[in-house]
Amino acid sequence: MCFSTTASLTAGAILCATSVVAIKNAKTSGQKILGFTPFFFGVQQLIEGFVWLSLKTETFASLNMPATYLFLFFAQVFWPTWMPLVILSLEKDRSRGRILQYIAGLGMFCSLLLATRMILFPVHSGIDNHHILYTFITPFHAPAILSVIYLIPAVIPTFVSTTWRMPFLGVLTIGSLIASKIFYGLYALSVWCFFAAIISLVMIYIIRHLVVADEENEMRRLVF
């Protein structure tokens, strides 16, 4: 996480463990895919824990670059593609599904764009004011444009979805982003990833609801 090695590793372990339980309890492929989302957030937090270790302990210094790039792979490349595809896998409304397909296409473009930036230009991570600061050393500076391109596939699908409580998840995500930008500024990337990871626990609650709803529907079919 943004504040300490222990917090990052602890959050990652909890997310991974609770996600495994949710995946085991899921009844459909869409529910299982959704269950992997907090699991991947947990992996991301564990990786940032190693970024912390590489910056604070000489023994782990050699892990700095691979851990930094792995964290940024999840934070910037993975999520714009993964999120719309996950929500699409649960969507039952055809018109909403088509919208999600278009957004997924944009997400893949966004992932490719950000992956290319990571490959072509160096990235630096360092501890600053008790947070991890990720610096992209590029000849251009277009954070507003990149943020919009990123947010559309990473967040907007939650508002398009008709799945139970998914828009609520979107509200929490947007709220955490605004809070991260206002209160943490330069460190928003690290901080928002932590908030988003914690918020992803809502997905486990959603899975539980969907499983119960499916079981109730099955009982009704058997009765009638």
Image (cartoon, rainbow, N blue to C red):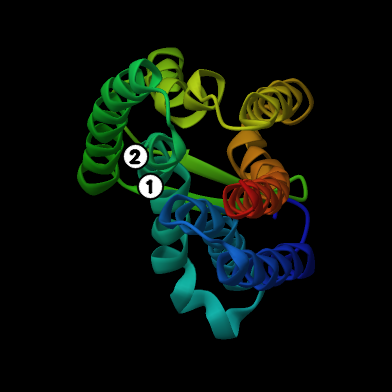
Q: Amino acid at mark 1?
A: Phe
Q: Secondary structure at mark 1?
A: helix
- The answer to whether residue 64 is above or below residue 210 is below
- The x and y percentages for residue 127 are 66, 53
Label annotation for residue 188: none
Q: Are marks 2 and 1 in contact (CB under 8 Å)?
A: yes
Camera-side residue: 221 or 49? 221
Q: Residues within 10 Å of mark 1 (few under 14, many from 20)?
A: many
Q: Is residue 111 left or right of residue 201?
A: left
Task: Decide: is 168 above or below 120.
Answer: above
Q: Residue at x 27, y 43 (%)?
A: 115
Residue under label 1? 78
Q: In this rendering, does residue 149 appear at all?
A: yes
The residue at 78%/63% (across/down) is 7
Left or right: where 36 falls relative to 187: left
**Residue labelled with disc 2:** 81
